[in-house]
Amino acid sequence: MVLRHAAADGCGQERDSLRDGVFGRNGQRLLVLVTRPIWAVFLVAAVAVTATGLFALSATGVFDEAQSGQAPTSSLPTTKPAGPTTTTTVAAPTTSATSAPAATPGQRTSVSAPVQSPVGRTRYVFPVGGCRGDASESHHDYPASDIFAKAGCRFVSPVDGWVDEVTRVDGWDGTTNVGRDRGGLSVSVVGVDGVRYYGSHLSAIAGGIRPGLIVRAGQTLGLTGKTGSARGTPPHLHFGISWPTSPGKWWIRRGAVPPQAFLASWLGGGQLSPVSSVARVRRAYGVDRGCRSYC
């Protein structure tokens, strides 16, 4: 409450019924009427506001930081809270014939491929094991090699991979000489390098070998012989290199890339890879519309 007062009492002094807050202007005085109880209320309110502000600053860490010169400490836990975790277990590929997925003759089993070895780490071995094998330098009508060896030598997987197709029945007839039957007993393997390897004219196929079975380089797939169109020739392993196809495309499976340089390397312990050659020949081959030669 503001009062404007220009008069003085008989002693020439203002009345003292008003206290404090005196302002002078042009011979007049402006007095603010403030009693002791009101001052007390203002004082309590000021203290309360100050205390509240300090508490708020302290709660946010700002006040503590200003006082201590250190960054505010986080109230989050330093370790991950305990709780249920999910563990993914990857089973190792099986090489056991008894645990391989069952497949009916003529069908191809779909399986997950094993993880491919790093580039340059794929291991190659010569496909005839335990015996001497002499690979032909050429082959009639299409790229392949006849590896001559006595009957009963081991035909082994030249690389880590999985079984692609298996022929357990020798259906070749010399009077008809149907192309799909010329190989007699045969096994093909798709390697971890993405290349397909084929061996035929076998006298027997190893027990448990079936489409989808994971195999390792050097693992026995069958025994050399003279089934199919090799009945009238010395025993040998017909060996072909190609790219994977859908089942039954025997004109590709029998051989599409000359294997001689690779066989010579593996026989001497080398590791020459056919990957680039297969890719190049496949591009040049173009669209597959069926058998093109010696059908």
Image (cartoon, rainbow, N blue to C red):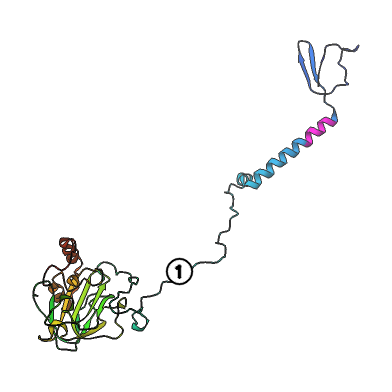
**Magenta: main secondary structure:** helix
Give the residue pinned by disc 1.
Answer: 88
Image check: 201 left or right of 163? left
Is there any visible trace of residue 206 in the rendered image? yes
Residue 130: quarter of image: bottom left
Q: Nearer the viewer, residue 290 or 10?
A: 290
Image check: 102 left or right of 83? left
In percent of width and height, residue 286 lies at 17, 61
| Label 1 secondary element | loop
Quadrant occupied by the N terminus: top right
Q: Is residue 201 on the magenta stretch?
A: no
User: How many numbered marks are there?
Assistant: 1
Q: Nearer the viewer, residue 132 or 14?
A: 132
Residue drawn 48% across the image and 69% down it: 87
Residue drawn 16% across the image and 77% down it: 239
The residue positioned farthest toward the front in the image shown: 175
In percent of width and height, residue 74 lies at 58, 53
Residue 259: quarter of image: bottom left
Compared with 220, 65 (above or below) is above
In percent of width and height, residue 292 lies at 13, 67
Residue drawn 58% across the image and 46% down it: 69
Q: Residues within 10 Å of mark 1 (few under 14, many from 20)?
A: few
Stretch of the chain drawn in magenta: 37-44
In percent of width and height, residue 5 lies at 83, 14
Q: The residue under label 1 is which amino acid type?
A: Thr
Quadrant occupied by the C terminus: bottom left
Residue drawn 16% across the image and 89% down it: 151
Q: Is residue 40 on the magenta stretch?
A: yes
